Amino acid sequence: MIDWSIWSFSYATGKLPKDFLSGSPVSSNQGTQPVPMIVTLLKSSDGELILVDTGFAAGESMTGRKFDDFCRSDELLRKFGVDPAQIGKLVLTHMHFDHAGNLDAFPNARIYLQRYEYESWKTAIEEFGGGTAQGKDHWAFSSLNVPDFDALERAMAQGRVELLDGDREVAPGVTCRLAKDSHTFGSQWLEVQTRVGPYALAGDVCYTFQNVERMWPPGYTQGNTFNMIREFKKMKAVAGDDLKRLVPGHDIELFTRYPSGRRDGTAFIEVALAEGHASLIST
């Protein structure tokens, strides 16, 4: 069995109302909280490297607030001794700006994205934006950077993009799970097998542990919240009733529920460590 190490890095930190993340009205009128923006690195026991999401090269918040502690994902990886050119596979959970920007920094990666996500956003751009870039004041584009599609399509022209049609194992023990019409049109989350059990890397199909604990969707989504709850159940079946093997997309509790560290201003968590791999926390 191929084992995987899993590390998630906060490449920037935002601040949002709690109900934006954990749902209205159960988390309304509870102020704001820090929101980590994460990318995740997988390393197999035989050395394969997979990056899950790429963050943004220059992100603009829908609230107008600047992000704290920003570090571009390729620069972040170098801090931890990983050359971006060594990333052989790149999984985009969805096309929102904080997950699918900075693609040009990974020139050798094969990119995996759900076909339904790509084609549905292209239709939405044509319908609501005429193919031009939109500001964050338009709901349809509040979490989208339209120019990110230019970088994606350059990679397509190079033959580096594989559009998935549903669930697919993209490496031994790493499976993309389509969450159709949930957070976005074709969001996906990952199931990763390790020697201590499978992990659910949620992307933005769930933002917080509380989403799954209460089966309560977040206050901001661009899909169907009933479908999100169905995906919560699937992720819980993978992560366990105690959710000890769940990595939500934007929960500051990640840094208390998992072993964590900080290097050159970048906070990270060590989700799982394959046998024989060195801990990043101890180096």
Image (cartoon, rainbow, N blue to C red):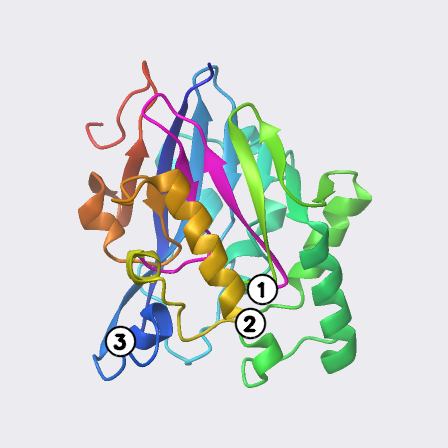
Q: Is residue 113 above or below residue 238?
A: below
The Cα–Cα distance between marks 3 and 1, rounded to whole angstroms, is 22 Å
Report if the CB atoms under discs 3 and 2 are less than 8 Å apart: no
- Sequence-first tag of 2 and 1: 1
Q: Magenta segment range?
A: 185-208
- The residue carrying mark 3 is 27
Q: Quadrant of residue 141?
A: bottom right
* Secondary element at image label 1: loop
Q: Residue at x 30, y 56 (%)?
A: 209
Residue 265 image point, x, y percent: 26, 50
- Residue underneath mark 1: 184
Looking at the image, is 215 positioned above or below residue 234? below
* Amino acid at circle 3: Ser
- For label 3, the SS is loop
**What is the number of the mark on residue 222?**
2
Query: How many marks do you count on the picture?
Result: 3
Residue 227 place in picture, x, y as percent: 53, 62
Q: Position of residue 64 (x, y in %)?
A: 42, 80
Q: Residue at x 21, y 79 (%)?
A: 30
Residue at 27%, 30% in the rendered image: 280
Q: Earlier in the sequence, mark 3 or mark 1?
A: 3
From the viewer's perspective, is residue 242 above or below residue 129? above
Kind of residue sitting beneath label 2:
Gln
